[in-house]
Image (cartoon, rainbow, N blue to C red):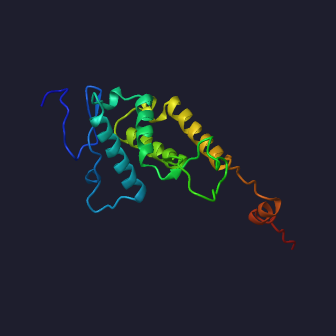
């Protein structure tokens, strides 16, 4: 085989020859045959294969090394057509209402939470399959900004604000119950 030749095999995830990454199928067969993958691992594999198919169908076809944050954004926008979440436009009478009383012609989109989870899985799959964290297109600033924009626009459209979850500080009673009692001294 030539040193820079890409291998088209369903059992390879990313083939790395002379620092050239190529997307092929991320396969469950790379782990031991008796091990069943978790739901997360299966979803990650399916997402990775879907993204690989998207790159192969792209015109012109893209290799993973040529993929940038802009291509990831293009992929996310492409996925919107398969979304199931109604996102009201600003001219819709139900804009800002979490539970609209009637149907409207507003578009269906991918929910922010789904996109955020997808990017997390693809980011992990990229690095698991030989990609360097510093070149990970799924971690690009443009992708993070796009996700934030989607989150904010969907929150406004539904009239719901997404706020960061704040960690609960343990109350003083909880701290006292979990701390050890002072040692008792015995006098003889």
Hey, which quadrant is residue 20 in on the image? top left
Hey, which quadrant is residue 98 in on the image? bottom right
Q: Is residue 104 above or below residue 19?
A: below
Q: Is 186 displayed left or right of 140 in the figure?
A: right
Q: Residue at x 37, y 47 (%)?
A: 47
Which residue is nearer to you in this view: 54 or 157?
157
> Residue 103 at what x, y percent from top left?
56, 56
> Residue 35 at what x, y percent from top left?
32, 61
**Count of marks placed on residues:** 0
Q: Residue at x 67, y 48 (%)?
A: 96
> Residue 140 at what x, y percent from top left?
49, 31
Q: Is 130 displayed left or right of 95 in the figure?
A: left
Q: Residue at x 14, y 27 (%)?
A: 2
Q: Residue at x 45, y 36 (%)?
A: 138
> Looking at this rendering, what residue extends furthest in the right direction?
187
Which residue is nearer to you in this view: 98 or 32?
98
Quarter of the image containing the C terminus?
bottom right
> Residue 187 at what x, y percent from top left?
87, 71
């Amino acid at each position: 085989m030539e040193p820079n030749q890409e291998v088209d095999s369903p059992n390879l995830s990313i083939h790395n020859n002379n620092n050239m990454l190529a997307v092929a199928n991320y396969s469950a067969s790379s782990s031991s045959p008796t091990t069943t993958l978790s739901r997360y691992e299966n979803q990650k594999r399916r997402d990775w294969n879907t993204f690989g198919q998207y790159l192969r169908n792209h015109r012109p076809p893209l290799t993973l090394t040529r993929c940038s944050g802009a291509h990831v954004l293009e992929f996310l926008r492409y996925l919107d057509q398969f979304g199931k979440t109604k996102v009201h436009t600003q001219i819709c009478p139900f804009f800002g209402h979490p539970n609209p009383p009637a149907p409207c012609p507003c578009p269906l989109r991918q929910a922010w939470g789904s996109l955020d989870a997808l990017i997390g899985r693809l980011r992990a799959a990229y690095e698991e399959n030989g990609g360097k964290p510093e070149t990970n297109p799924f971690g690009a600033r443009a992708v993070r900004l796009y996700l934030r924009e989607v989150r904010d626009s969907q929150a406004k459209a539904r009239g719901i604000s997404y706020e960061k979850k704040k960690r609960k500080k343990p109350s003083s009673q909880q701290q006292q119950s979990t701390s050890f009692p002072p040692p008792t001294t015995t006098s003889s």
